[in-house]
């Protein structure tokens, strides 16, 4: 888990960092919060300690901690984030000034550092600030570009604090292995919906979480990621390009259109195997006691992708089973000529559908069988990427 030194300086966006701390706590990050005196004028240290249950430090000369704060903390953390970073703090750090706990810790810290400048547009565009931020970038700081929009003082321009999602992404990216850099990964996720009439449809049980976690993990590890998603109540992982589709046919068209681009194709979607043979234009009325809906098979996207792929494209399928997990998965893998299949037993209620947890068995082309015990889908996603990497020569 990341050990984050989160330094808050005195900008109006300081209140947005409370939400960042709350997200960090939910993720299980370890955080130490360092505040400048001006930051404490915008947000009370109590707000930070209450939301995160993390220690908050404000005074470099606080003797009650029994340690020299800036040096001890700078050895403890494995990443340092200054959010928001005021023009004043940027100027101080860029020029080696260490006159408060934040600037002292920043100067002493040797690991990856992220600066999140947010300020008035005229302060941000002032050539002195521009030069200071450039100086920080040149010395290894990762300076996030502020967003453009309405600023706290009513002006419009560049200087807004970015989404906390982006900051969390940068933390994970900088601490991650970056081993998927420049690899193009296409992921399908979620269910498809096959309409019966204007208000009804047939679908599969699927939250889309597993596919979204894989897309997110690949992006964090440096990949370019396209996510083709059926209807799912999930937000797009930061930096991932999402294409929304509804039906199996739309998903097929989207995949066929994008697949040439991909080095790795991971088909985690729960595609409907059957659809109504005709879609009615008007709503079906409940005038009869019984009715039949005639279904026809949809096209198997995974089978088609695997059949027409280029030799260096790596194709991974999923198998959701309620019985004979390994036999069924092996059959799918061999009949669809896959490089790898991720099988999960969906008969257990504490993993799989809707759950943030999963337990999977991965069958690989070289006959390796790898079981991953019940764990968070984010963890399973990282493991799936590790296994793909070790089975794919180009990435090794
Ligand atoms: N799949 C697909 N197109 C379909 C149906 C499935 O691409 N029309 C893909 C899924 O994305 C998944 C894999 O095929 O990667 C396995 O899906 P699953 O429904 O478990 O198996 P099926 O091959 O459809 O077989 P069955 O329903 O008989 O278990």
Image (cartoon, rainbow, N blue to C red):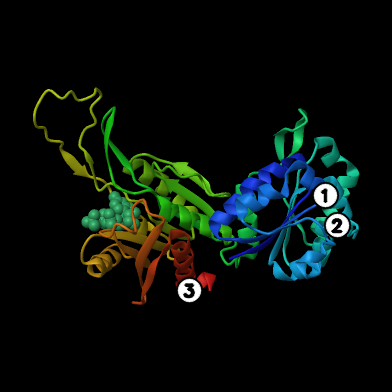
Query: Within 10 angstroms of label 2, few (less than 14), some, or many (20 or more) residues?
Result: some
The picture places residue 118, in percent across and down from the top left corner, at 76, 43
Q: Nearer the viewer, mark 3 or mark 1?
A: 1
User: Distance from label 2 to label 3 (Cα)?
Assistant: 47 Å
Up/down of 138 relative to 233, above or below? below
Residue 173 versus residue 59: which sits nearer the camera? 59
Whether label 2 lies within 8 Å of ligand 1 gets the answer no
**Image mark for residue 100:** 2
Which residue is drawn at the image coordinates 64% and 58% (left, top)?
A: 54
Which residue is drawn at the image coordinates 63% and 50% (left, top)?
A: 50
| Contact between labelled residues 2 and 1, with CB atoms less than 8 Å apart | yes
Q: Earlier in the sequence, mark 1 or mark 2?
A: 1
**Residue 21 visible in the picture:** no
Residue beneath disc 1: 37
**Image mark for residue 367:** none
Up/down of 110 relative to 164, above or below? below
User: Distance from label 1 to label 2 (Cα)?
Assistant: 8 Å
Residue 257 versus residue 289: which sits nearer the camera? 289
């Amino acid at each position: 888990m990341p050990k984050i030194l989160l330094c808050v300086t005195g900008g109006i966006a300081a209140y947005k960092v409370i939400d960042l701390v709350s997200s960090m706590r939910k993720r299980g990050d370890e955080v130490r919060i360092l505040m400048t005196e001006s930051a404490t004028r915008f947000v009370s240290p109590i707000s930070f300690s209450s939301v995160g249950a993390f220690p908050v430090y404000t005074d470099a000369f606080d003797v009650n901690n029994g340690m020299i704060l800036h040096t001890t903390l700078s050895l403890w953390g494995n990443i340092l984030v200054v959010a928001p970073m005021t023009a004043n703090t940027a100027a101080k750090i860029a020029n080696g000034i260490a006159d408060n706990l934040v600037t002292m810790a920043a100067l002493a810290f040797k690991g990856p550092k992220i600066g999140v400048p947010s300020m008035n547009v005229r302060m941000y565009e002032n050539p002195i600030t521009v030069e200071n931020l450039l100086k920080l970038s040149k010395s290894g700081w990762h300076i996030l570009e502020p967003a453009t929009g309405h600023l706290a003082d009513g002006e419009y321009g560049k200087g807004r604090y970015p989404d906390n999602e982006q900051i969390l992404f940068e933390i994970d990216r900088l601490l991650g292995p970056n081993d998927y850099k420049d690899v193009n990964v296409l992921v399908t996720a979620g269910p498809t919906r096959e309409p019966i009439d204007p208000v009804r449809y047939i679908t599969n049980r699927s939250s889309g979480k597993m596919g979204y976690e894989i897309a997110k993990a690949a992006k964090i590890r440096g990949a370019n990621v396209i996510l083709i998603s059926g209807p799912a109540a999930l937000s797009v992982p930061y930096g991932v390009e999402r294409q929304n589709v509804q039906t199996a046919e739309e998903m097929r068209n989207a995949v066929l259109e994008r697949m040439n681009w991909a080095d790795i194709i991971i088909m985690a979607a729960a595609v409907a195997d059957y659809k109504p043979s005709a879609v009615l234009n008007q709503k079906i009325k409940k005038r009869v006691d019984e009715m039949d809906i005639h279904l026809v098979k949809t096209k198997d996207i995974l089978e088609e992708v695997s059949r027409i792929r280029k030799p260096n494209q790596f194709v991974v399928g999923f198998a959701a089973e309620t019985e004979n997990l390994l036999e069924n998965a092996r059959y799918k893998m061999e009949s669809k000529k896959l490089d790898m299949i991720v099988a999960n037993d969906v008969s257990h209620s504490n993993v799989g559908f809707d759950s943030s947890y999963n337990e999977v068995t991965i069958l690989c082309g070289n006959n390796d069988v790898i079981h991953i015990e019940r764990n968070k889908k984010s963890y399973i996603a990282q493991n799936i990427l590790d296994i793909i990497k070790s089975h794919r020569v180009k990435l090794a």
